[in-house]
Image (cartoon, grey):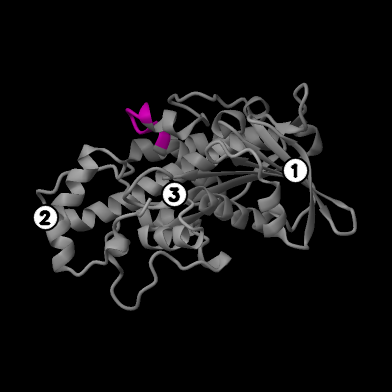
Amino acid sequence: MRLVGIDENGYGPILGPLVVTAASAKLKENAIREPEGSNPVPNLWSLLKIKDTPGDTLFVCDSKEAFTSNKKGYAEDLVLTFFFLTFGFLPETADQFLKPLLINQRLGLPFPCSKEGTPPFCWQNDLDLKIDSARRKLILKNASNLKKMAERADVKFEKPCSLLLCPRLFNEGVERTHNNKSDLVITLGLQILSLYLVEKNLYAFIGKVGMTKSYGQRLSHFLERRYLVWTIEEKKEASRYQLYETTGREVGQVTYLLAGEKNSFLIALASLFGKYLRELFWKKTQKYFEELDPQLPGASGYRNLKTRTFISATERLRKELLFPQGCFLRKK
């Protein structure tokens, strides 16, 4: 049995990338719990005995909550713990973390950003993750503990993967969806989901986008004639669909969850990876501009005063360097 959680990060900002990430695991049938009144839903928090609130040891929770309370870097260390467990090495730089995760080209999407010669400004600079000996020791210790916990529960975590849309790719994607940002995110989630449809007995959980309740038509359209989609339920909290092969054989279920990070361990884990990936990519972009003008203010990329100030402060530089507006500023 394979379980998958898919979530987005960077839906709201006006600068920086949009990221959609999947985290997955294989486990035995008896690892599934059936809460009252619902279809089988994995309870990996209980199964693995991992906390669902931020702390100084192993936890998996809402990425916003984790990084907001991230006073001592515990959220980064948690992500790096799972990275080491699944990829088998500890990245020393941002690019060593980013590049193994990105699957744009695997799904036929441009790699951000594909240009000949000198890397574009968003990739120009790498970042040292600055993992000192104490942090390294803690990460490796937690990874060892996590591996033992997973083995006891017969859970095998797989390598997470992400689609990353820099502003240029984001703007092109929004144009293709007639300025519907929600449709773009839903489509990206389905593209990642397609990677996991090679096996039967799949349970996929995807974070809901806004207040969208019905996803059946999008699923059917995306899957075309390969699979049949049967609607189990479409409610505010969860929209659940059963997939069948054209022969009638069951493939698995796809469930869109409201507040997915609080209701699905793997959605929360995917969001933690996506949040960290997005922040590293945006820091790389800022570093490029800061090296040209050390007086530039910092910014998160979200729609606030600091971001607007950063946009204004970089305007002269961007004009001098002939940067297309669409490579820097998102349309929506």
Residue at (71, 47) in percent of width and height? 216
Residue at (20, 70) in percent of width and height? 322
As displayed, is residue 113 above or below residue 204?
below
Mark 1 neighbour density, 10 Å: few (under 14) some (14–19) many (20 or more): many
Precedes in sequence: disc 2 or disc 3: 3
Identity, as a three-letter code, of the amino acid under mark 3: Leu
Is residue 202 visible from the viewing direction of this image? yes
Name the foreground residue: 106 vs 222. 222
Identity, as a three-letter code, of the amino acid under mark 2: Asp
Residue at the disc numbered 3: 90
Q: Label 2, label 3: how many angstroms apart (C-alpha)?
A: 32 Å
Magenta span of residues: 68-75
Q: Quadrant of residue 55?
A: top left
Identity, as a three-letter code, of the amino acid under mark 1: Tyr
Secondary structure found at label 3: loop
Between tags 1 and 3, which lies in front? 1
Residue at (68, 32) in percent of width and height? 235
Residue 74 drawn in magenta: yes
Q: Considering the image in quadrants, where does the N terminus appear?
A: top right
Instruction: Tell me which secondary structure the magenta stretch mostly adopts.
Output: loop
Q: Label 1, label 3: how many angstroms apart (C-alpha)?
A: 38 Å
Residue at (36, 29) in percent of width and height? 68
Find out whether the residues at labels 1 and 3 contact each other: C-beta distance under 8 Å. no
Precedes in sequence: disc 1 or disc 2: 1
Residue 208 drawn in magenta: no
Residue at the disc numbered 2: 293
Q: Label 1, label 2: how many angstroms apart (C-alpha)?
A: 52 Å
Residue at the disc numbered 1: 241
